[in-house]
Amino acid sequence: MKYYVLLALAIAAMTVMVACGSKKQNSEKEVATSPKYLVLYYSQTGTTKAVAEELQRKLGADIESIEAVEPYSGTYEQTIERSKNERETGVTPKVNPLKSNLDEYDVIFLGYPVWFGTYALPIAGLIKDCDFAGKKIVPFCTFGSGGLDASVKDLKAALPKADILSGYGVRTARLAAMPKEVDRFLKENKYVEGEVEALPDYSAQQPVTEEEKTIFDAACSSYKYPLGTPVTVGKRVTADGTDYLYVVKSKNPAGEEATCTIYVTVGNEQDAKPEFTQVVR
């Protein structure tokens, strides 16, 4: 009788050890397959930094700022003038070496303000110094009117061996909306767990009515540069309000006639003011 009791205890102990070992192996496997994120960003005024820190918090990622060897100090106008001169003369500003080892990360969230329609020049300095081949890169940016699509296109051209994924952008004037938008972006793209309601498609483009023209003007007239005249519009209704996609007649930097797309949103709140979210040229 004693022999069978001891045998039963031994079998039970072995079962526990196997189960624990299995749990340990599964845990190690989960750790091994969990992507490691780095939020890497350049920020001139602190706006892009705010987006970077929100991403870092939600992802539980490592974070590092990109620093120019010769900082862009001075007023906004002085920064623009320096950047303009560097672009015209082909100067790529040098950046300080990164402390992070890019080889340790599976996905890199790369952030920047938009200057002259594309990523800020310190990003060009980073690209010149670092090897992003084989890396998954998620762009994010801040801007006055737009530049996400154009800057992503330029990143793809500059980093042909990297995998440039869909990005996120926000107007500086709408920074308060950023945390909610970042949450949706991360969940939609499966970087974090969670479900979000799918957004409907925009309706077909129709000629702009007087009411829709009034909404466009309320969203865009206070912007410091003329954004053009809306010709047609498509709409969609979401849980948060109504979004408008305007096709607009405008002029390009050379003063030539052009067409652009301007997105406007109006919240559900009774006193909600129309805001334009981005211009796509």
Image: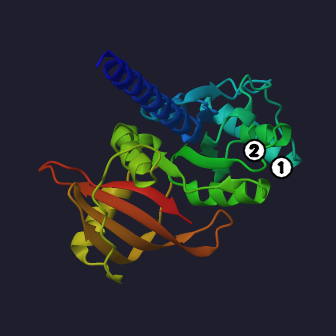
Tell me the quarter of the image containing the C terminus.
bottom right
Is residue 254 positioned above or below 249 on the image?
above
Image coordinates of residue 156 in percent, x first then y, are: 71, 58
In the picture, measured across the screen, residue 115 lies left or right of residue 161, that is: left
In the picture, measured across the screen, residue 216 lies left or right of residue 96, that is: left
Q: Is residue 267 visible?
A: yes
Is residue 66 positioned above or below 193 on the image?
above
Determine contact: label 1, label 2, CB under 8 Å. yes
Residue at 62 percent across and 67 percent down: it is 252
- Residue found at the very far top of the displayed protein: 2
Most foreground residue, 281 or 215? 281
Image coordinates of residue 147 in percent, x first then y, are: 58, 55
Q: Is residue 85 visible?
A: no
Residue at 62 percent across and 43 percent down: it is 107
Callout 2: helix, strand or loop? helix
Distance of label 1 from label 2 (alpha carbons): 6 Å
Crowding at mark 2 (Cα within 10 Å: few <14, some 14-19, many 20+): some
Tell me the quarter of the image containing the N terminus.
top left
In the picture, measured across the screen, residue 153 lies left or right of residue 146, that is: right
Disc 2 marks a residue whose amino acid type is Lys
Crowding at mark 1 (Cα within 10 Å: few <14, some 14-19, many 20+): few
Q: Residue tagged by mark 1?
A: 88
Callout 1: helix, strand or loop? helix
Q: Which mark is residue 68?
A: none
Q: Residue tagged by mark 2?
A: 84
Residue at 21 percent across and 71 percent down: it is 211
Image coordinates of residue 35 in percent, x first then y, are: 57, 40
Disc 1 marks a residue whose amino acid type is Glu
